[in-house]
Image (spheres, rainbow, N blue to C red):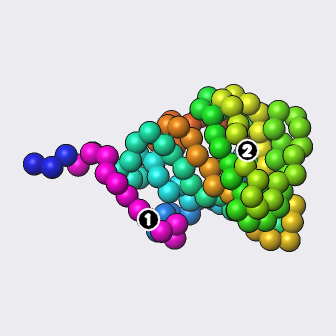
């Protein structure tokens, strides 16, 4: 009998991954597709995906225990990393240490697209701690 939970080599097309959207005053307004994450795919050790921010979109300031990597492959924006505002555009990469406060906003005419990666088995293992309190 074959183990259904075994880790296997896998190649997918980004369009095959379900698109999720956030649109609220704390988390921000953006869409993302998680490409590899245990529970969604038969993978382990890494969770990664693609985020898109359209005109005026943003990801709220937050922290999480695992480190994260961003790689921007289209568009332009401002990365807020521990209070520093850093312009980013296609070709920019950022290493974000665990528990470092960060967020990003789109600033250009083109959709900001970035690849993100965490060294965890599953996206469910990343607890986002947003800086802003919910507005009520």
Q: Which contiguous range is marked in magenta?
A: 4-15
Is 118 left, or right, of 131 in this rendering? Answer: left
What residue sits right under mark 1 in the picture? 12
Residue at 54 percent of width and 50 percent of height = 48
From the viewer's side, name the closer residue of 48 and 92. Answer: 92
**Label 2: few (<14), some (14–19) or many (≥20) C-alpha neighbours in 10 Å:** some
Number of other residues with Cα within 10 Å of mark 1, as a class: few under 14, some 14 to 19, many 20 or more: few
Image height of 22 relative to 74, above or below: above
**Considering depth in this image, is 90 or 29 the residue closer to the camera?**
90
Depth check: 61 or 88 in front?
A: 88
Q: Is residue 52 above or below residue 129?
A: below
Image quarter hosting the C terminus: top right
How far across and how far down the image is residue 1, in percent? Answer: 10, 48
Q: Is residue 134 magenta?
A: no
CA–CA distance in space, label 2 to label 1? 24 Å
User: Residue 9 in the image: x percent, y percent?
Assistant: 34, 54
């Amino acid at each position: 009998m074959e183990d259904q939970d075994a880790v296997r080599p896998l190649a997918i097309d980004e369009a095959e991954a379900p698109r999720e959207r956030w649109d609220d005053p704390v988390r921000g307004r953006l869409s993302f597709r998680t490409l590899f994450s245990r529970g969604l795919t038969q993978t382990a050790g890494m969770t990664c995906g693609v985020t898109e921010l359209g005109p005026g979109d943003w990801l709220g300031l937050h922290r999480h225990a695992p480190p994260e990597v961003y790689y921007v492959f289209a568009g332009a924006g401002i990365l807020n990393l521990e209070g520093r505002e850093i312009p980013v555009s296609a070709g920019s990469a950022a290493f974000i240490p665990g528990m470092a406060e960060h967020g990003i906003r789109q600033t250009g005419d083109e959709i900001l697209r970035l690849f993100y990666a965490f060294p965890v088995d599953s996206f469910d293992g990343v607890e986002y701690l947003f800086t802003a309190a919910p507005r009520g």
